[in-house]
Amino acid sequence: MDVRAGVLAGDIRSVARGISWVENDDPRAAELIRGIYPSTGRAYIVGLTGSPGVGKSTLVSRMAALMATGKRKVGVLAVDPTSPFSGGAILGDRVRMFDVALSPNVYIRSMGTRGSLGGISRATRMASRVLDAAGFDWVLVETVGAGQSEVDVHDVAYTTVVVMAPGMGDEIQAMKAGIMEIGDVFVVNKADRDGADRTAAQVASIVQLSDEREWHPPVLKVSAELNQGIESIIEAIGQHKSFLEHSGKLAEAKASMARRDVLEILRARLSEDLQHELDQPVLQEKLDEVANRHSDPYTVVDTVFEQYWRKP
Amino acid sequence: MDVRAGVLAGDIRSVARGISWVENDDPRAAELIRGIYPSTGRAYIVGLTGSPGVGKSTLVSRMAALMATGKRKVGVLAVDPTSPFSGGAILGDRVRMFDVALSPNVYIRSMGTRGSLGGISRATRMASRVLDAAGFDWVLVETVGAGQSEVDVHDVAYTTVVVMAPGMGDEIQAMKAGIMEIGDVFVVNKADRDGADRTAAQVASIVQLSDEREWHPPVLKVSAELNQGIESIIEAIGQHKSFLEHSGKLAEAKASMARRDVLEILRARLSEDLQHELDQPVLQEKLDEVANRHSDPYTVVDTVFEQYWRKP
């Protein structure tokens, strides 16, 4: 079966192959995305973020299992390098420990690339489109804390779930501003442990400060390990989704998602072209000047910019 | 004192300020880098990479302390989100727990940015230049495994130290290809634990496979916690440095470092400009078509590319 047709038919081997293409920047990836893009925009993408050690991966597995009831299909993209789904890889490439399904309706995939700048971000974005076109109802993207990973979860998902663990009080206090902007749903995992109530109360008090917001992010206490409270997260995500739909914000978010797809691809393409241009003799001279410290990078950038970039 | 003069005089407050500028993409960063670039190219930059949990941060502290003997100045840039130097940040911003010196000659700094793509990579690169211009002899860059972080350590350092821990045998077997390309020095940390010999032997056997290489990466067993074997790492780094110097490869590496400085800044600048262009009405229409699935990102990129990019 050709990969495009396979993806559109929901064939999982085609999905896996397509995602490998976007990861490896295979030339066939562009053709695939062109071919499937009209069939995208239906999946609901949820981001999960939080520090290493808060238990995101267990939580994601539990959520995926629950979301996959009633024949719904769930795709998980693990971008977090500390995720067991990513195999705790050491070097250069990664061992895929969990590139397998928990149930026939759950597909879990770790994301990585061979290191081009912006590669993981673009690959994650395009892998979401592949899952979307393949009829996945939910896509869950697991990342480490915002600004720490190449993938800013807020940019790739409609609903962002921030996962915490008890005993992060000081950190939370120090981060008031960031918290309110990022999370749509807050989850205190490991709620059976000491300090869960205190952590939840702290987050709630900070979230309440911004009551001019139309959406009031819930703060949930759960235990992924004990499989307790997972349904409350799914419910909260559902409520946030309804809120976005009824306020017209989901349409906005989808438009802006498409816009960013364009930007990321444009960046990659320019970057390739730049790399090629920098090999030309005239630029090579300028680069040598920088290497010899007779010039500096900003001065060369000014030159290149004037030379190749055509203002409309 | 003005920041440029301060950096050039080795004033640590100016260094901290300059690095904050590059992190925040402050317009003053460009002016600073222009001003200090002629004074760079002297520091020796070492990258340390490895999975979370192998003990990189303790190792880095030990190495920095040892490297700082005899009035030598050591700067540490912690890019690893799981590093305690990065404060195990949860969200949006980070708590700097260790933005302090271990000794007057060691400066430790966690790296983060407010999330622009390529931001951490560019900031780390420019922070290295700031430390270099300030007279730091050594710069240590701590990252998680290659391809998992936005910063590819191989691109920002002259010598790459790959840190492992006992019991990673299966992973190592699975990654033969990657290992040989990346590491100049291999360190098995926690050598007092079971399995250290076996892990070291496995790495050594893989490294030996590529004996057409001119440099034969040593495999060292150390214990950062017990402060054992740290001097052997410094020695191995010194040997690799000599090898690069005598083979002419260090000069090459420095030239290529300058070239990449240009590329990263160029990318950032193009990216800003692109973002601006995408707001123009004519492109907005095309983006709407993508959002409505009447077009796809690759087709729009083709258009934009032809329109704004002037081939030489």
Image: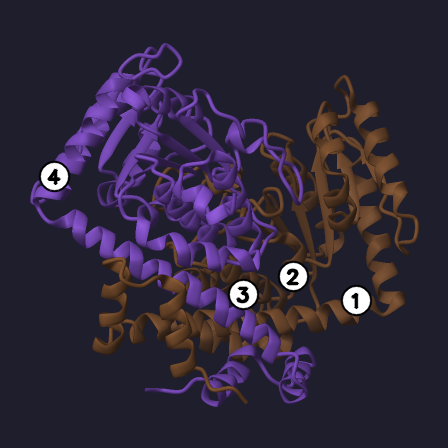
Chain colours: A purple, B brown
Which one is closest to the eye, mark 3 or mark 4?
Answer: 4
Amino acid type, residue under disc 3 in the picture:
Met
Estimate the spatial distance between the alpha carbons at disc 1 and disc 4, rounded to whole Å: 57 Å
Estimate the spatial distance between the alpha carbons at disc 3 and disc 2, rounded to whole Å: 14 Å
Name above or below for residue B298 compared with residue A35: below
Chain identifier of the residue bearing label 1 in the image: B
How many numbered tags mark residues here?
A: 4
* Residue visible at 83% across and 30% down in the picture: B202
Chain identifier of the residue bearing label 4 in the image: A
C-beta proximity under 8 Å, tags 3 and 4: no
Q: Is residue A310 toward the left or the right of residue B282 in the image?
A: right
Residue A159 at x, y = what percent?
A: 25, 39
Name above or below for residue A190 compared with residue A78: above
Mark 2 = which residue? B136
Amino acid type, residue under disc 4 in the picture:
Phe
Estimate the spatial distance between the alpha carbons at disc 3 and disc 4, rounded to whole Å: 43 Å
Name above or below for residue B304 compared with residue A29: below
Mark 3 = which residue? B126
Estimate the spatial distance between the alpha carbons at disc 2 and disc 4, rounded to whole Å: 53 Å
Which one is closest to the eye, mark 1 or mark 4?
Answer: 4
Describe the element under mark 1 as helix, strand or loop. Answer: helix
Describe the element under mark 4 as helix, strand or loop. Answer: helix
In depth, the one of A77 and B240 nearer the eye is A77
C-beta proximity under 8 Å, tags 3 and 2: no
Mark carried by residue A62: none
In depth, the one of B300 and B100 nearer the eye is B300
In depth, the one of A193 and A91 nearer the eye is A91
